[in-house]
Image (cartoon, helix red, strand yellow):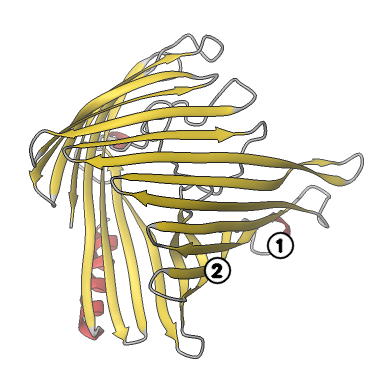
Amino acid sequence: MKRTLSIIFAILIVGSMFALDFDWDGEFRSRSAMYNNVNGDPGGHTDNRFRLGLNTELHPNLNLRALLEISHMWGDWYAPAGGNINVDAKEVYIDMMVDAIKSRARVGHQPWADHRGLVMDDTFSGVSLMHDFSEQMNFKAAFGKYLENDPEDRHDDMQGFLFSFNHEADFSLGADAYFTWMRIPMGAKNSMFKYVSLAPYLNMRLNPIVLDATVIFQLNDNGYDFMENKVETETAFGVAVNVSGDMEPLEWNADLFFIGENDLFSLSNYYHNNLYLLGIGEHHDGLGLYTFATTADNYLALTGQAKFALTEKVKFFGAAGFVNGAGFEINGGMEYQLIPDLMGVALYGARAFMDEDATDKDPYAMGATLKLEF
């Protein structure tokens, strides 16, 4: 651990010495939660996460970005005296201006997120090209390597192309697309699994209401028939609609998410639906026992959330949501700004009432999250 921290500090010192411009950003988060598992057994844990981002301008046309994450769960590996803390590089890439085509290129481990995080909201290793047609319109294209098993075997890898087009205005339009492929091992080395996604969206700002809608179409290879020596392909379809309003001191939003009979393929999705147990919650994203789970043929989630600002520092929030074939959840809590625009704490609780075909154990969760952002 000491050696790792020494390397981090060395990077900071060297980066500041040779940079034309140098700054950093970061986040510290500590969260604690009590909950039960799928068998109804009670449990809980506390974890920390510290992220430090380094932004270095080495040349007017060349920037270096590194985002380091230090995280651990309290009591990991019976270590009351400390140690066993994970240090990861979440982002490490260079960003350079290519004057010949008036575009920016990135090489390295970098972030990528589609409009609602239906397929990907994470980082990947690869190369990307970004071009701004105007202040409102931009296009991005990338190639990413998602999985490298044996470097000497090209039949066990996963990679793909990523595309994004965005036009930002009061009436915004855009689309995200993915073409992913993976070689099939076990005697079918001349074939590939292919996953194709297209997700157009629109966003309308009708002050004080915002309407956001995304439709996703997919063509996915999800099986291999060794008897007929061919790949089995199926189509998938989904719709995500969100309506929100900011009417001070009240904020609200309603969300609908539908997936057809076949599941959507995702690389690393991160779709928020205001639920903690039947989805991904705002103040804790690791409690979802039944995220996107259903016993029905189709997935349908209907949720609503409201947040009321009692003062500049205090907000109360609550949400309720239904997922067919899974159950119904209610949750609520409060947010308090310890230092406005810098550090805050949130308290929350959630309870789900599960469909009898899903489980006879109703999950619950309650916890607190402290977050510092700079």
- Asked if disc 2 and disc 1 are in contact, CB closer than 8 Å, the reply is no
Quadrant where the N terminus sits is: bottom left
Quadrant where the C terminus sits is: bottom left
Depicted 122 relative to depicted 288: above or below: below
Residue 319: give x, y in percent of width and height.
31, 27
Q: Kindly identify which numbered label has been placed on residue 154.
A: 1
Specify the farthest residue to the front. 206
Residue in the picture at 48% in, 54% down: 114
Specify the farthest residue to the right. 228
Residue in the picture at 31% in, 60% down: 68
Q: Which residue is labeled 2 in the image?
A: 141
Depicted 315 relative to depicted 153: above or below: above
Q: Is residue 358 visible?
A: yes
Which of label 2 and label 1 is nearer to you?
A: 2
Residue 347: give x, y in percent of width and height.
19, 30
> In the displayed structure, does residue 192 sit left or right of residue 230?
left
Q: Residues within 10 Å of mark 1 (few under 14, many from 20)?
A: some
Residue nearer the viewer, 33 or 350: 350
SS state under label 1 = helix
Three-letter code for the amino acid on which mark 2 is drawn: Ala
> In the displayed structure, does residue 338 sit left or right of residue 100?
left
Residue nearer the viewer, 297 or 293: 297
Three-letter code for the amino acid on which mark 1 is drawn: Arg
Residue 357: give x, y in percent of width and height.
56, 11
SS state under label 2 = strand
Q: Is residue 85 visible?
A: no
- How far is mark 2 from mark 1, CA to CA? 23 Å
Specify the farthest residue to the bottom. 100
Among numbered discs 2 and 1, the one appearing first in the sequence: 2
Residue nearer the viewer, 11 or 214: 214
